[in-house]
Image: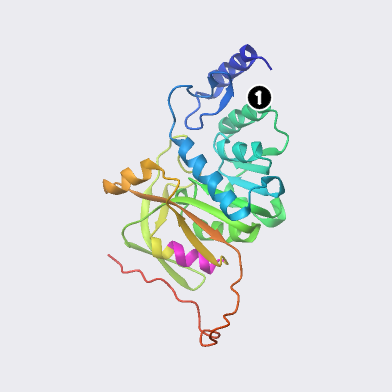
Amino acid sequence: MTDDAIAQRQQEIIQQYGPWTNHNLRLGDHLYTMSDETCSGAEVKVRRVLQAVRDFCGEDLSRLRVLDLACLEGLYGLELALHGATVVGLEGRESNLAKARFSQEVLQLDTIEFVCDDVRNLSRERYGSFDVVLCIGIFYHLNAPDLFEFAQHIAHVSSRLALFDTHVSSTAEQAYEYRGQTYWGRSYTEDHTAWGSIGNEESAWLTRPSLYNLLADVGFDSVYECHQPMVPKYEQMRDAGQADRSTFLALHNPPHPLKTTDLLRNQPRDRYGDVPQ
């Protein structure tokens, strides 16, 4: 496809669905989905995601099957597919999928598939298992109990790594009960923009301690937080007291028995404590 043909098709998509809102991809020489001069802000997150996947899963991404949940305009999945991974992108809005599929066509990628579905329908029976699951910008758009069931489904379909890029609450204002455990956070009122929730007016933002507990409760063995590569916007929001958003890496890797002691053999897993505000 020539640059002129790409530009013409891009304009047709924009006329039908509106301009790209966040995912600025290079389609050709000086031809991007948004701008060839200004970053959208998503680029630094892509750098973080790619680095994390390579750190935990190795340099050869061609062996990986990846799920990109609520993939928006497809940037993260497309990046990993360009590095050789086999990718499924799940997205609830056809307008976003049209843009993602257009980029897929231009980039001539046959290792990525985009599916229109609600992330709440995720299951191993429906989509199979994945080495890596990307949960970027969607976890904080779900309300209870969907949020907890979604985390459980992610744990079920991921065989190695799940990456959660999400807002967390700095206050423990509201209690949520799920499977005999209590989690804390606060309610967030959703808007009706193209980035907003689908089907719920409010969402639940968990505190950091409750998020750590939940990820362990649904079956992950380790949880890490990524600080480098940096996402400057996250640090700016945190420093200004506006919001706390970060990238958490949850892994399946059953603990090995200790050889220097057996005193922890029958000890239950410790839980993080939340203090209600």
Residue at image x 47%, y 43%? 197
The front one of 192 and 32 is 32
Of residues 219 and 172, the one nearer the viewer is 219
Q: Is the magenta stretch mostly helix, strand or loop?
A: helix
- x and y percentages locating residue 5 in the rendered image: 64, 14
**x and y percentages locating residue 75 in the rendered image:** 56, 36
**Residue extending farthest top:** 4
Residue, far bottom: 263
Relative to residue 43, is residue 66 depicted above or below?
A: below
Kindly indicate the quadrant of the structure image that contains residue 190. top left
Q: Is mark 1 on a helix, strand or loop?
A: helix
From the viewer's perspective, is 125 left or right of 21?
Answer: right
The residue shown at (37%, 54%) is 187
Q: Is residue 145 above or below residue 115?
A: below
Residues in magenta, as a range: 211-218
- Was residue 32 drawn as part of the magenta stretch in this picture? no
Q: What residue type is labelled 1?
A: Val
**Residue that mark 1 sits on:** 106
Placement of the C terminus among the 4 image quadrants: bottom left
Q: Residues within 10 Å of mark 1 (few under 14, many from 20)?
A: some
Residue 97 shown left or right of residue 271 in the figure: right
Which residue is nearer to you in this view: 30 or 114?
A: 30
> Where is 49 relative to 144, above or below?
above
